[in-house]
Amino acid sequence: MSKKLVIDPVTRIEGHGKVTIQLDDNNQVVDAKLHVVEFRGFEKFIQGHPYWEAPMLLQRICGICFVSHHLCGAKALDDMVGVGYSTGTKMLPTPEKMRRLGHYAQQLQSHVTAYFYLIVPEMLFGMDAPPEQRNVLGLVEADPDLVKRVVALRKWGQETIKAVLGKRMHGISSVPGGVNQNLSIEARDRLLNGEDGLISIDEVIEFAQDGLNLFYDFHEKNREQVDTFADVPALNMCLVDDDGNVDYYHGKMRIVDKNKEIVTELNYHDYLDHFSEATEEWSYMKFPFLKDLGREKGSVRVGPLARVNVTKTYADDTPLAKAALERFHDYTKGKANDMTLHTNWARAIEILHSAEQIKVLLSDPDLQKDQLVITPPEGAWTGEGVGVVEAPRGTLLHHYRANEEGNITFANLVVATTQNNTVMNRSVRSVAEDYLGGNAEITEGMMNAIEVSIRAYDPCLSCATHAAGQMPLIVSVLDSKGELVNEFVR
Amino acid sequence: MSIKVTIDGKEVSARDGDNIIDVAAENGVYIPSLCYVKGKPCLGTCRTCSVKVNGNVMAACTIPVAEGMEIEVNEPEVTDMRKALVELLFSEGNHNCPSCEKSGRCELQATGYEVDMMVSRFPYRFTPRVVDHSSKTIFLQRDRCIFCQRCVDMIRDEKTGEKIFSIKGRGTHARIEIDTDLANEMSPQQVREASDLCPVGCIIDSTQGYDDPIGKRKFEVKTIRDRALERTHR
C-alpha cells in the first residue's frame, strides 16, 4: 500500500517547515517536497511607513541575519535619496567600511551558530545517532572545550556587531547615505586584543581554523557519504567584485554553471529583467528562476557553496582562507561543487574568511575618520532603490519605492532561502530516494537524513516567507489517484 | 510664601502656588508626565502624573500645593494607576518603538521603562490612523499621537501666531491635524523644536533622522527621571 511520510516540524532550522514524501507500493519515492508553512507579511506592512524606517523595521524579519537586512535596506535608501550605487555615487570609505565590519561580524556569528550548533552534531555523532545525543547538549557532553570555544566565538561576533550597530541584535547604524558613528580606538583595541571574558581576533582566527579542521576530519572518515549525499545540480550565484571574486557587500550578480562558465552577470538594479518567481500551492515560499532559462534550468543556488564555487580566489590579506579555498577547489578539479554536504565545508571556510577580513578591517584607520554621511544634493531624490548583499545564507535583495512625500509604496524582498527553494527541494528528493527508497522499514535516522539535507542550507524560513497579498493559501486533499477530493481556499 | 506639605509622609517646604510635580521634583520625588512642560501653562491631558492628594486621585500638574496637603506619589494603588495610564496610551495608538525614529528620545517609551511596563494589560486597539506626510519637513505619524496637545498650544506660526497643529474630531474619532501651508513656513529650528516637544514619534523632522547612535540617545545618556529631577528634561 502506498504511504505518505511527514516530517513536521523540520528541526534545527530557523522558521517552520515540513516535508512530505510520497512512497508507492514498492516503497519507491514518488514525490518529495519541502513545504514552508509559516506566513509573515513584511512587504505589506512596511507600506505607508516613512522610507527611512525600512531598514530599521525590515531587519526585524530575522533574529540572525538582521545586519544583512539592515544593510540591504540601507543600500536601497542610498539609491532612494540619490546617493546610492544606482546614481553612480561611491560610498565614503568610513561608512562603507563600518557597514562591512558589521556585515562580516554577523556572517561570522551566524555561520558559527549554524555550523557548530546545528550541523556539527551529525558530523560528530552520525545522522542515525539517537536524537537525544545529536544536539548541542550532546556536544556539551562529548566535547565541552569545543562548545566553550563556540560560545567565545559567538560572543566575539556579537560584541563586534554591538560595537558597530549599538546592540547585539537589531541595532541601527546605517542612515541614508552613510552611518551614524565610526569605531572608537577603544572599541577597536578591545576587539583586536580581547579582554577578560572576550577572546582576541587572533584567537577568533585560531578557533575558526579548528572548525575547518573538524570538517576535514569528518570528511576523511566519511568521504563516500559526504560526497554522494544530495549531489544535486544547480547554477551558482553570488555578488562579485571586478575580479570576479565574492564581495559580501557590493558587486555584480554573477551566475556560473557546472564548468564555472559565466551564464549571466547583471547589475542587481536590473534584477526584474532577469528573474521571475513561481508559486506552488503547497508552500508559502516562492521559487525564483532566471527568465531566459526557465524554472528547471534557471534556478540558482546561493550561499556558502555557491560563493566558493563562483569565487576564483580570496585576497592575499586573508591567506588562511585563501589556502583553504584552493584546497576546496582542488577537490573538484576546477568544476563547480554540487555536493550538498560540502556546503558545510564552504561555511567553515567562510567563518575563517570573515575572521581574517575583520582583522584587516580593524587595522584600517578609515574606521576612525569622521566623514560619515554623504548629504544628497537638492533634487537628488529618486524615490526608488535596490540593495543587495551576500547574507550568510546567500544573495539577499531589498527593493523599495516611495512616493514624493516619502511613504513606502512598494517593497519586494528576495531572500537567500527563497533563491535556494528549488535546489533544497532537489536535495530532499535526492536524499529521500537514496535513503528511504525501497526500504520496507523507515527509521528515524533515515528521516533525519532528509533534515540534514535541508539544514546544510541553513534555511531561514521566517525571512523567506515575508510577502502578503499574492501568496496562495490552498489546502488540497487528493486521493490515491491524485484526484481532487476537496479544496480549501483562504 | 513658603508652606508645608507632606510627600509620601515626609514634610517638605514649598512655594505656595507651585504645582505638585515641581514641588515633588525639587524634593527628589519623580512624578512622570507626558504633557506638562515646566514654565508652560498646564495642559492636564495625559493624566500620567496622577497622585493621591488628601486621599483623592488627581493629576499632579493641575494642582497647586496648599498648606498641609498630603500627597502620596509612591503609594501602591496610585503607582499602578499611573502604570495603567501609560499602558493605555500604548494600547490606544500604534506604537512601533523598534523602527521609530524617536526611539531613545521618546518620552512615552522612557516613561514606560520608568513605570516598569513590560506589556499592556489592555488589549491593543490597532486603531486605523492615516499618516500625513504632506509637509515638506514633517512626517506626521498619527499612529503615535497621544493627544497631549503640547504642539497645539505651544507651536505657533512665528509671524501670525496662528496654530499650526490642531485636534479635529471627538472621542475615538479625534485626530491631530497639521496646517501644511503654515508647516512649510516653519524654520528648520522650529521644526526641530516641534519634534523635540512632541513626547512621542508623532511629529518627526523629516530632514534628519537616526543621527544619534544607540547608546548615545537622549534618554540613554540620562534617564527621563534624572532629567525631570534636574528639571532639565525639556
Image: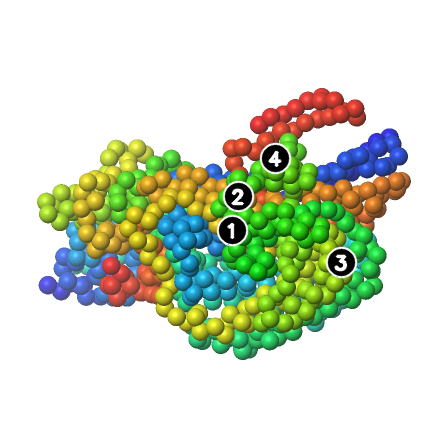
Residue B99 seen in this snapshot: no
Q: Earlier in the sequence, mark 2 or mark 1?
A: 2
**Residue A450 position in % (x across, y down):** 76, 47
Residue A468 tag number: none
Instruction: Say what amino acid the circle numbered 1 marks.
Output: Val
Tell me how far mark 4 sits from mark 2, CA to CA.
Answer: 15 Å
Depth check: A97 or B181 in front? A97
- Residue that label 4 marks: A278
The residue depicted at 40 percent of the width and 65 percent of the height is: A181
Secondary structure beneath disc 1? strand
Residue occupied by mark 3: A332
- Cα distance in 3D space between marks 4 and 3: 32 Å
Looking at the image, what colour scheme do you see?
A: rainbow
Where residue A370 sits, quadrant-wise, is bottom left
Q: Secondary structure at mark 4?
A: strand
**Which residue matches tag 1?**
A388
Q: Nearer the viewer, mark 1 or mark 3?
A: 3
Q: Are marks 2 and 1 on the same chain?
A: yes
Residue receiving disc 2: A271
Mark 3 touching mark 2, by CB under 8 A?
no
Q: Label 4 is found on which chain of the structure?
A: A
In the rendered structure, which disc, 4 or 3, sits on the residue that comes first in sequence? 4
